[in-house]
Structure formats: structure tokens, C-alpha cells
Amino acid sequence: MDDSGTIDRDQLRSMLGDELADFADHVPDAMARELLHGDHGFVAPYQLSAALLSRLTPAMRDWQTADVLRAIYPATPLSRTRMQPIAGALAAVACRTFPGFCHFPYIPVAHMAEGRDEAPLIVAVHGSSRNAKDLRDGFATFAERLGCFVLAPLFPMELDMSVPDEGYKQLVDDRWRYDHILWAMVDELSAAARTRFSAVLLFGFSGGAQFAQRLLYVDPGRLAAVALGAPSYVTLPSERWRWWSGLGDFQRLFGKPVDWPALRRVPVHIQCGTEDRLDCAIYSAEEMGLDAAAHDAFGRNRIDRARLLHEQYGREGVASRLTLISGAAHAWGPHVEVAKPFFEEQLVRAASV
């Protein structure tokens, strides 16, 4: 598109690719401008599909993109937004059940265009940096291709420094059950999009991996697969040590025992970078409730702890695999990329059953 606003349909055909090029002349003007500008306000090129483009009509030529999508998508609470996408990458969405918490969702465009009512969900949990939006965006293209939703919760820091920063990683503190907050977000997104989540694929990086592996103990029956990216601290599957180093007081905290048969059915992918070797010694043996020997055996860095968790899971019959990501330090991006084929493998396997 040139500065005069003329739409280059040939450029649009090239953007759409051979499979969708025949739709180029049917794309409404406002949508075409958005696509050619790379604006991504309501729709991005990777979100387009024959399911969506085949529903465009000549009457829509002069419509705004938001109105085109409202005409195509089934009516949902999201249809009332004017400045936010109705599907795709939404802005932060408040949790109604737990005000003060929010999440960044991705709603697959093709899913909405086709009016489906069931889809898998990827939950992607941030570490201490609270980069929830980055994790959502990291999974977006993958999620659109596979028809998955994404939900990246944000567990904010408190300005009151008397409150520990680690509560969400440990699932429970003096104020909150963070597993309850997450499941409320999941239920609210499901209701808003009128979609049943057929499988929940759980990813966490660093502190988010701590959250994820602890949620696996609490709610294994709700999870289809778990990818743990470089957890700084792990919870060993042993009642010898109290929570969160172990499971000694699990039933008191969570009101139920660990469901080991359900947990053993969940595939777990433990990940760590080969260069993630910096000592990560935040807690003393006393703070962790470990004796000196157990604290030494826990390891000094994330590689040590990933290996320890993999070994301990193996002893308990938990189906885990360990991948050391060549050249990766403590960065979330490589872990998202390694988790994607693992999640796709689980979805393909489930579809073939």
C-alpha cells in the first residue's frame, strides 16, 4: 500500500500465500490496510484461514475490520469490544472472581470463525519477571495453527514488601490459593468464549515452572501435559520433607492426598539450558526444612535440580523426560520453543485415540 492509501492487492496476494491468494480481492479495504501495515490491531496474517476468508461478502467491502469480524464470529461477550480484538491476542483481562489478578489470553481466530465449541488450552505461567504477555505472544502463532487457546496469568508483586514474593510459586500463602485463582481464570475464559477446554497443557518458566510442577501434584486430573522450563526450586515427590520442598504436609494444606494414579498419567517434560549454571541458592537448609545432607543433594543450580526432579519422578513412576537445551542460559524463549513440539505431540496422540 502506498502513501495515498491505494491498496496493493498483488502485495496482499503475496502475503496470503498460494493457498489463500484467491481471497485477496474479497478482503474488505480496512482489513487489507491493517494487514499490509502489519498493524495487528484486529487480525494478523498468520490468523487468516479459508474458514474466515470464505465468509467475506461484497457487502463488507467498506466495513471496518471489527464489524467484519463481528458479522463472522458467533456472538459472545467479547463481541462488544470496539478497541480490542474479538479473537486473537487480547489485552489483559481482569479476573472477576479474584479482582486484582488478570491474564493475557489468545483466542484462535479460525476457531471462532468456524464456530467450534471445544479446543485445547495452553496455560503459560511467568517467572519472577512477570512477563505474562511475552509468554502469551510466544505461543500465539503455534496456538493459532493448532486451534489452541492460550491463557497467561499475571500474579503481580505487592508494593508491601512485608509480603513474600514467592507465594504464587508455592501455590499457597497466608492470603491466597493461587491454584484457585488460575482455575477461576480458566473457567471465566471458557464461559466468555463459549468453548469447552478439551485438554489443558501447562507450561511454566523459572518461578512459573515451580508453580506448574506444584499444580501437577494438586490437580493432575485436570492436566493433559506439563512442560517445566528451568525451575529454580523443585518439590520432591517425598513425604519426608514438608511443603514446598516435599509433600509432608500436603493433605493439611490442600485438603486431599496426592492422586498418584492420575499424576502418573500426565506426561512431563523437564527442560533446562546447558548454560543455566549460575548458583541459585536463595533459601537456606533451615528455610527449606531440609537437613544438611538433603540440602547438599538438592544441587546448586537449575541443571542439578532438573536432573534431581527427573530422577525422583522416575522412582515414583511419573512419565517424565529431561531435555537440556544446547547453548541456552536462563531465558524463557528457548524453553517456549522446546515446549511446542512436546505439546503438539500430546495433542496428536490424544486425537489418534
Image (cartoon, rainbow, N blue to C red):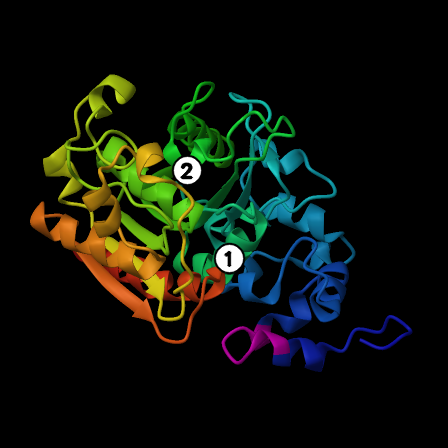
Q: Nearer the viewer, mark 2 or mark 1?
A: 2
Q: Which residues are magenta?
A: 15-22
- Looking at the rendered structure, the kind of residue marked 1 is Ala
Q: Which residue is mark 2?
A: 169
Residue shown at 23% from the left, 37% from the top: 220
- Looking at the rendered structure, the kind of residue marked 2 is Lys
Q: Which mark is residue 140?
A: 1
The numbered mark, 2 or 1, whose residue comes first in the sequence reads 1
Q: Secondary structure at mark 1?
A: helix
Q: Secondary structure at mark 2?
A: helix
Q: Residues within 10 Å of mark 1 (few under 14, many from 20)?
A: many
Residue shown at 48% from the left, 34% from the top: 189
Residue 87: image location, x then y, percent:
57, 47
- Nearer to the camera, 30 or 321: 321
* Rendered position, 264 above or below 270: above
Residue 70: image location, x then y, percent:
64, 43
Residue shown at 29% from the left, 61% from the top: 342
* Rendered position, 169 above or below 341: above
In this picture, residue 337 sits left or right of residue 157 = left
Per the model, the C-alpha gap separating discs 2 and 1 is 24 Å
Question: Residue farthest to the right?
Answer: 4
